[in-house]
Image: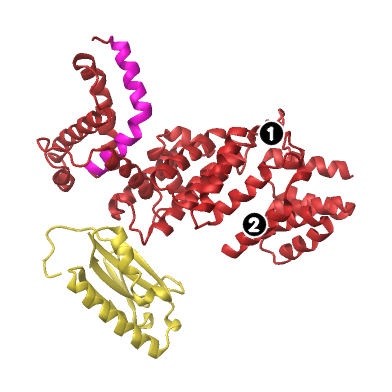
Chain colours: A red, B yellow
Amino acid sequence: MSSTPSDIRTIVDDVYRRESRRVFATLVRLVGDFDLAEEAMHDAFASAVEKWSSEGVPDNPRAWLVSAGRFKAIDTLRRRTRFDASLEEIARRVGDSSSLPQGIDDESIEDDRLRLIFTCCHPALGRETQIALTLREVCGLTTEEVASAFLTSPSTIAQRIVRGKSKIRDAGIPYQVPSNKDIPERLASVLAVIYLVFNEGYSASSGESLTRSDLSAEAIRLGRLIVDLMPDGEVIGLLALMLLQESRRTARTSLAGDIILLEDQDRSLWNRDHIAEGHSLVERAFASGVSGPYAVQAGIAALHASASAPDQTDWGQIVALYDLLLQMGSSPVVELNRAVAVAMRDGPAAGLPLIESILATGELNQYHLAHAARADLCRRLGHRDEAISSYRQALALARQEPERRFLERRINELQ
Amino acid sequence: MKYMLLIYGREDAWTENEREQCYHDSTKLTHELNEKGKFIAASPLHSVSTATSIQIREGKRIVTDGPFAETREQLGGYFMIDARDLDEAIEIASQIPGAKKGTVEIRPVVELTGLPSSL
């Protein structure tokens, strides 16, 4: 069977899309250095185009690429050690090209993907570095793509990534799945990174547009990957939470880019596939026995998703889940959300004193949604002046254009 | 890899009894580390009020009292260890009594060749 060069290129491109991050993760383990692994992986794909044309596509392209990449890395190291003696240690670790690489079976390769995630999200790295490294090294986004997603310059992201990789190397951050004892702490860091990426895509913290859907899609992809590799209750809970929020994406903004509140959304626009998957994941998360904050938040999102109309929402159950969430770790934002749910269950007069006592602590003074929540309850109670003054406070703090337009609209309606 | 564990804390955070206990627990830790071949050196430091700083500027030596940085947390001691990787260093640093009151900073050591091998 003969393939034309363009056939081969299509095949290699396809393998690249499916396998390049796996090949990279395994090469990092085998060669012990991120940059060397990246370069070796690209060399391996380049030589695949050539070799597969003449010799045919191998039975296991992934193993072929790992093996070819490792040989390329050894060549590079040999060349460089002539000039730089400090590379000898790495060269020794990689071994020589006559020995076969260890652990390139499917299971080891899946473990390598976990190693890569845990390394990029190591708590010894700053949160912004964790996010940049995860998107760059685990998801394979380009530096430019990461920069545009976070509205920063490519040079800022490039610097963050370079510093992160230097710290991994110089501080000796290991390339391994943490021990069972450390898993809860380390997994929390991984999940926090994924949820931040999701939220930046779902509700961008600043800028013209309300959402940047590519980031949310990456976060969901990462969530699925970790559910496959490490199906812990909280991992499943986080994936469920993201899918249930994502299900409302098209319904939560108008064509003009304005915010549509949950109660005003056209529920027929909600993505039923996401909701169905989210529901079954929530059940799985709760059935796992240990339900943490992500699973509980997913439970709340599932209750919203299963209401066919706003007045069908089970607010009593939602308040109960917020109570559970507060037991797991008190946070003023959770208290605020609980107060809003109480207002929905028992009326605005019941929620207002709760929100006012939260604001009185001062912790949420700079949080625009706390003022907006108070404004909304005052508005419902007909306290016009108080509502306007709270909307104005919220407006002074809001940084996102669609949110600012929403608050201005509310103020105009009341004046 | 070699790591320097720098123990920072407020000097007034310890009572005399607590300090004695800290020395006792730290000494025990050095023996545990030594048995596993991970110990290089460790020592508490006298109070920062005993510190002297030296600078050479344009060939002239300047001797002054104390350190220059006005921080509340002072360097109070150190461990030098040999650990497999950062995770093991974190594990060891977490057992240092000073971590309960102050901060233990983990710094990987630049391993120069050609130093005397007494360490």
Q: Secondary structure at mark 2?
A: helix
Alpha-carbon span between mark 1 and mark 2: 25 Å
Local packing at callout 2 (Cα closer than 10 Å; few below 14, some 14-19, many 20+) is some
Residue A48 numbered mark, or none: none
Q: For residue A66, what is the image quadrant? A: top left
**Which residue was labeled with disc 1?**
A251
Q: Is residue B105 above or below residue A402?
A: below
| Quadrant of the frame with the C terminus of chain A | top right
**Residue sticking out furthest to the left:** A98
Front one among A104 and A8: A104
Q: For residue A73, what is the image quadrant? A: top left
Which segment is the magenta one?
A4-31
Indicate yes or no whether the magenta region holds residue A17. Answer: yes
Residue at 51% in and 48% down: A284
Left or right of residue A313, residue A202 in this image: left
Q: Is residue A199 visible?
A: no
Q: Are marks 1 and 2 in contact (CB under 8 Å)?
A: no
Residue A321 numbered mark, or none: 2
Q: Residue A255, image x and y in percent?
A: 71, 28
Left or right of residue A159, residue A387 in this image: right
Indicate yes or no whether the magenta region holds residue A395. Answer: no
Q: Residue A323, image x and y in percent?
A: 65, 61
Identity of the amino acid at label 2?
Leu
Q: Main secondary structure of the magenta part?
A: helix
Identity of the amino acid at label 1?
Ala
Between marks 1 and 2 in the image, the one whose residue lies nearer the viewer:
2
Residue at 47% in and 37% down: A221
Q: Secondary structure at mark 1?
A: helix
Q: Residue A16, image x and y in percent?
A: 34, 26
